[in-house]
Image: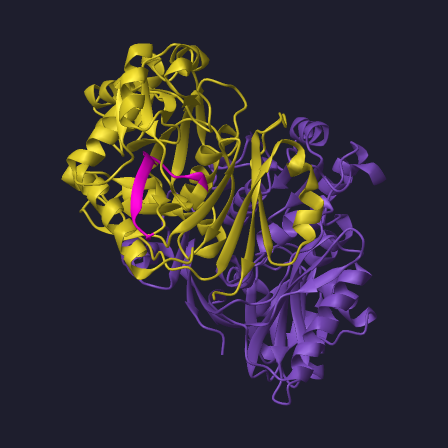
Chain colours: A purple, B yellow
Amino acid sequence: MAQRFPLKPGSMIGVLGGGQLGRMLTLAAGRLGFDVTVLEPEPDSPASRVAARTLVAPYDDPEALKTLAATCDVVTFEFENVPAAVLHQLKTLGALAAPGRQPLAVAQDRVSEKDFFRENGIETADFYAVAGPGDIVSGLSRMGGRGLLKTRREGYDGKGQTWVEGASDADAAFQRIGAKPAILEARVPFVRELSVIAARGRTGEIACYPLGENWHEDGVLRRTVAPAEASESTREQAVAIARGALDALDYVGVIGVELFELANGDLLVNEFAPRVHNSGHWTLDGCEVDQFEQHVRAIAGWPLGKTDALAQVEMTNLLGDEADDWQALASEPNARVWLYGKREARPGRKMGHVNRLTPLV
Amino acid sequence: MAQRFPLKPGSMIGVLGGGQLGRMLTLAAGRLGFDVTVLEPEPDSPASRVAARTLVAPYDDPEALKTLAATCDVVTFEFENVPAAVLHQLKTLGALAAPGRQPLAVAQDRVSEKDFFRENGIETADFYAVAGPGDIVSGLSRMGGRGLLKTRREGYDGKGQTWVEGASDADAAFQRIGAKPAILEARVPFVRELSVIAARGRTGEIACYPLGENWHEDGVLRRTVAPAEASESTREQAVAIARGALDALDYVGVIGVELFELANGDLLVNEFAPRVHNSGHWTLDGCEVDQFEQHVRAIAGWPLGKTDALAQVEMTNLLGDEADDWQALASEPNARVWLYGKREARPGRKMGHVNRLTPLV
């Protein structure tokens, strides 16, 4: 195994998931001379159209996994709802996955995730595991009567979560999230949302990008500004959080960590994504080595790239028909447009993004 | 036809040729949400492994051309030795090619190319069309007894050319280039080789990148430094040459024009390539919009992008086993490595390149 890394150019990288993150990973891999095999249940996915090979099959399809294991030098994922068992199966088949099964499993369960942070000395909002409405009532009594209820699994972009407004709302709230195992989180009096994108290589080296400041709408990321203005202490806390999580997970690859900044500049962790992250898209045009190439470098056992910002970037997601403005966006000086090649612009769907560059302040 | 352009994201672009230029064009197209179909006779080509579809067939294969015409919204080429008749066939089949047949035909014949420049008031070295050794003798008498003999067609990277050292060498020189129709060019007392990469869009707008200064070894490009230091007059001449050629050819796409600079700063044209050009690879990391995205924008009828340099770049080709140094290159701060995914590192083969960045002077 030691001699497998660093992977030579021409090696095959497997990617579970065929969305825009997979597409941008594949483009980055292409720059370095790698080829990509995508495994994705939907035909005609964005990543499939730039990949050397696509297996259209469920993530847990035994034949597809056998093919991935036999043909790929390393396997990664762009989508954190891939069943963690799939990474176990891949390992059994002799494949190497990065990140591994544990970070994926931890990230898939909001309670495990928060437990993991606490166990590693990283502060989070107060939380309470919920199996039914009774737990919501108990939790609320600890949290001043108000809390955010989220399914433990599979929520993203604001789906599967609801505010609980007092004990009388417990039953209804539990129904609103589909009556599933959940987590109740205390309200955090944060002043803004930040995120840190970081990478850890195969020999344990870590590289962090500057902080991004994020704005959400209806639970979906709208905009990231980076490098975010922040005190040195806040920046140091963010790096310490990323480093702590990466080391504790023996992580290989890029991670995205969402943070809440309190009025005094202190940070709480919201959650992490064991993959490249939407709030890191600014690096595509703002850094020498972007998060996608960085992830490829990390999982391939290559040296990590520089993470300094070369420009101040405002990244705006193009949701639904906003991407129809591509002509105007492409004409805008200092704007760099990325389009994902999705066939249908459903409302709220991430169709692309634009990075607007200004000189560093 | 008017309503075909600008092409919408999701459109299919056909590329004749599957080498590294096709690969980098395909990656650039992918960023903008386009898909690419490659037509290339060799299987497992660099471009094929990032393209949505590959047709492995000769460039003039009737079935392949029918498929290209039926499925691609525009067709371009990365390789100027595609038979010009293929572009005629594509037109007959209803396809739109950019650049068109004429620029390709002109560039394929060194005599037509020089005639074209002269007819458009663009200065070249003195030249003489050669059908046999007798023409070499006649030409030499006009050129002070020494000249560079090149096949009219299909030479590149220094192949198919030889110096003729006096009339007594005429027979042997003609044999050295394979006894083919040729051109004899007068020796130019140039002080350096420059190139200008420029683009012309569907509405006739033109954008030029800053000049590159080029060093060749054994007829192959080794290194480009850009933006090249040059007087304002030299820079203006280069832009005028590019603009003159682009307009006269009613060109759509990116062109690479190789220039000789004389001691007084005046420029002579050496030749042009009707495609993206090796001496423009510095733009990949030195400009907001690189030559590959610029070509895609031009042929798709999109607005052209900014061509300003953001950094001083030294581009070095990685030939043959030089690309084996990828690990060291990837560790070098401020170096950006591009590898083409070619399977075999034959001596002198272009395997990749590295862009080394320093702040603009």
Most distant residue in the bottom direction: A264
**Left/right of residue B8 with respect to residue B27 in the rendered view:** left
**Left/right of residue A68 with respect to residue B298 in the rendered view:** right
Query: In the rendered structure, which segment of residues is drawn in magenta?
Result: B264-278
Asked whether the viewer can see residue A36, the reply is yes
At horizontal 71% and vertical 28% (from top left) the residue drawn is A66
Q: Position of residue A357 (x, y in %)?
A: 43, 67
Q: Position of residue A231 (x, y in %)?
A: 62, 84
Q: Nearer the viewer, residue A292 or B146?
A: B146
Q: Position of residue B13 (x, y in %)?
A: 35, 34
Instruction: Give above or below for B272 relative to A295.
Output: above
Asked whether the viewer can see residue A125, the reply is no
Whether residue A146 is in magenta: the answer is: no
Q: Nearer the viewer, residue A143 or A86?
A: A86
Where is residue A144, by image quadrant?
A: bottom right
Q: Position of residue B360 (x, y in %)?
A: 48, 65
Instruction: Give above or below for A14 relative to A136.
Output: above
Where is residue A235, by image quadrant?
A: bottom right
At horizontal 42% and vertical 46% (from top left) the residue drawn is B192
- Total numbered badges shown on the rendered structure: 0
At horizontal 22% and vertical 20% (from top left) the residue drawn is B88
Could you tell me which quadrant the N terminus of chain A lies in?
Answer: top right
Q: Nearer the viewer, residue A151 or B79?
A: B79
